[in-house]
């Protein structure tokens, strides 16, 4: 079991972020008799996954909707529809960013030949 500071360090997030995840119902902690939070080692990967989902633009509410399928590997129709919609949104964003990357490469190439 990990203390909150250990989990924060291993997952690369702040203690504040972990408390927020707990408040949002995304992360559960056991409490010691002294009230200290304890997390299983598997929480490290779960928190890292949350970070990726946030970076991809999902909200806490979206992530909370996905928790049952993340934990069990099973989804219902509404969850699958939301997953597909999020995947499509992310794919569109990737295509947009790929275009930006191509444009930056063009600018770099032009500026490299004209110091």
Image: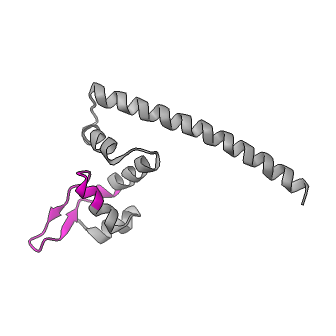
Q: x, y (%) of residue 71?
A: 26, 42
- Left or right: where 107 falls relative to 15: right
Q: Is residue 112 above or below residue 32?
A: above
Magenta segment range? 20-44
Q: x, y (%) of residue 106?
A: 79, 46
Q: Tell me where residue 111 sits by quadrant.
A: bottom right
Q: Tell me where residue 40 sits by quadrant.
A: bottom left
Residue lying furthest left: 33
Judging depth in this view, the residue of 37 and 55 nearest the camera is 55
At x 23%, y 51%, the residue is 25
Name the quarter where the C terminus is drawn: bottom right
Residue 50 lies within the magenta run? no
Q: How many marks?
A: 0
At x 38%, y 33%, the residue is 83
Q: How is the image coloured?
A: one colour
Q: x, y (%) of residue 11?
A: 38, 61
Q: Is residue 112 above or below residue 102?
A: below
Residue 29 lies within the magenta run? yes
Residue lying furthest top: 77
Name the quarter where the N terminus is drawn: bottom left
- Left or right: where 20 falls relative to 52: left
Residue lying furthest right: 114
At x 29%, y 56%, the residue is 21
Judging depth in this view, the residue of 86 and 34 nearest the camera is 86
- Left or right: where 30 falls relative to 102: left
At x 32%, y 44%, the residue is 63
Q: x, y (%) of residue 35?
A: 13, 71
């Amino acid at each position: 079991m990990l203390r909150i500071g250990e989990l924060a360090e291993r997952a690369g997030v702040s203690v504040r972020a972990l408390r927020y995840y707990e408040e949002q119902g995304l992360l559960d902690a056991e409490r010691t008799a002294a009230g200290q939070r304890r997390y299983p080692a598997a929480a490290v990967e779960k928190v890292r996954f949350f970070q990726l989902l946030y970076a991809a633009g999902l909200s806490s509410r979206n992530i909370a909707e996905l928790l049952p399928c993340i934990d069990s590997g099973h989804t219902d129709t509404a969850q699958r529809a939301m997953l597909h919609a999020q995947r499509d949104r992310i794919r569109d964003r990737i295509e947009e960013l790929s275009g930006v990357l191509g444009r930056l490469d063009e600018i770099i190439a032009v500026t490299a030949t004209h110091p």
